[in-house]
Image: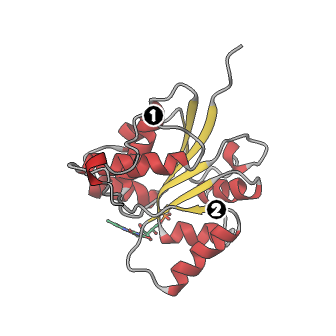
Amino acid sequence: MSTPKKRILIGLTGASGICYGIRSLELLAGLDNVETHLIVTSAARRTLNLETDRTIEDVQELADVVYPIRDIAAGPASGSFATSGMLVAPCSIRSLSAIANSHSSDLLTRAADVTLKERRPLVLMVRETPLHRGHLRLMDQVVEMGGIIFPPVPAFYTKPTTLESLVSHTSARAIEQLGIDIPEINRWTGPPESNVQI
Ligand SMILES: Cc1cc2nc3c(=O)[nH]c(=O)nc-3n(C[C@H](O)[C@H](O)[C@H](O)COP(=O)(O)O)c2cc1C
């Protein structure tokens, strides 16, 4: 008997860095044991158009299931709809605020609230800078409720030479917070022998 696929919810919001959400979908599409369920806000459609050459159809094709943002009756709106967690990449301050306050007025924020209440992993790739105290408070509220705040802060120990490799590494690390292994991720294994400091 084959093991059932892990259902992962992916949310794309209107913060800068829609490429992180797209790359996350691409990485997950390469895994046999994962099924992706996508929710895109209308502001994310706008940034997709402003920041990339992709169409919404290109992005939706990467997912197994796509839901309209306004469909608050869709599966992910209920805790009885089993998932293995949710990644919002990128996550705007508006959506962060809605999630932190359980203001579940669209499917994305409702699905995130359900993920928290069911004690499933919720990873928010919050993107804004600089941050004022209100932003920090919202992030603190989400962490208190069990969510994971994962800002897209690049790692340089991998010596990235392209923007793509930098985006891939950050996206893979975010996905791993959901307990999903990305085999091709470049991992730190300690300094090269010649560089060991005693
Ligand atoms: C090009 C562009 C870049 C943006 N970057 C950010 C950002 O980095 N962080 C953020 O919180 N909002 C950003 N915004 C504003 C959000 O899109 C806006 O607050 C929107 O209402 C978010 O809605 P959503 O959470 O439903 O996607 C940006 C908007 C545009 C057009």
69 is higher (above) or lower (below) than 65: below
Mark 2: few, some, or many residues within 10 Å (few <14, many ≥20)? Answer: many
Judging from the image, what secondary structure is the residue with disc 2 in? loop
Q: Nearer the viewer, mark 1 or mark 2?
A: 1
Q: Residue 14 in the image: x percent, y percent?
A: 42, 62
Left or right of 117 on screen, residue 62: left
Q: Residue 138 in the image: x percent, y percent?
A: 59, 76
91 is higher (above) or lower (below) than 29: below
- Nearest to the observer: residue 117 or residue 103: 117
Which residue type does callout 2 highlight? Gly
The answer to whether the residue labelled 1 contacts the one labelled 2, judged by CB atoms less than 8 Å apart, is no
Q: Which mark is residue 183?
A: 1
The yes-or-no answer for disc 2 within 8 Å of ligand 1 is: no
Q: Which residue is depicted at the point 35% across and 57% down?
A: 155
Q: Which mark is residue 147?
A: 2
40 is higher (above) or lower (below) than 103: above
Q: Earlier in the sequence, mark 1 or mark 2?
A: 2
Residues under labels 1 and 2: Cα distance? 24 Å
- The N terminus, quarter of image: top right
- Nearest to the observer: residue 55 or residue 181: 181
Q: Which residue is depicted at the point 64% across and 68% down?
A: 143
Q: Which residue is depicted at the point 74% across and 54% down?
A: 119
Which residue type does callout 1 highlight? Pro
Judging from the image, what secondary structure is the residue with disc 1 in? loop
Q: Residue 105 in the image: x percent, y percent?
A: 64, 64
Q: Which residue is depicted at the point 53% across and 37% down?
A: 181
Q: Residue furthest bottom?
A: 133
Snapshot quadrant of residue 151: bottom left
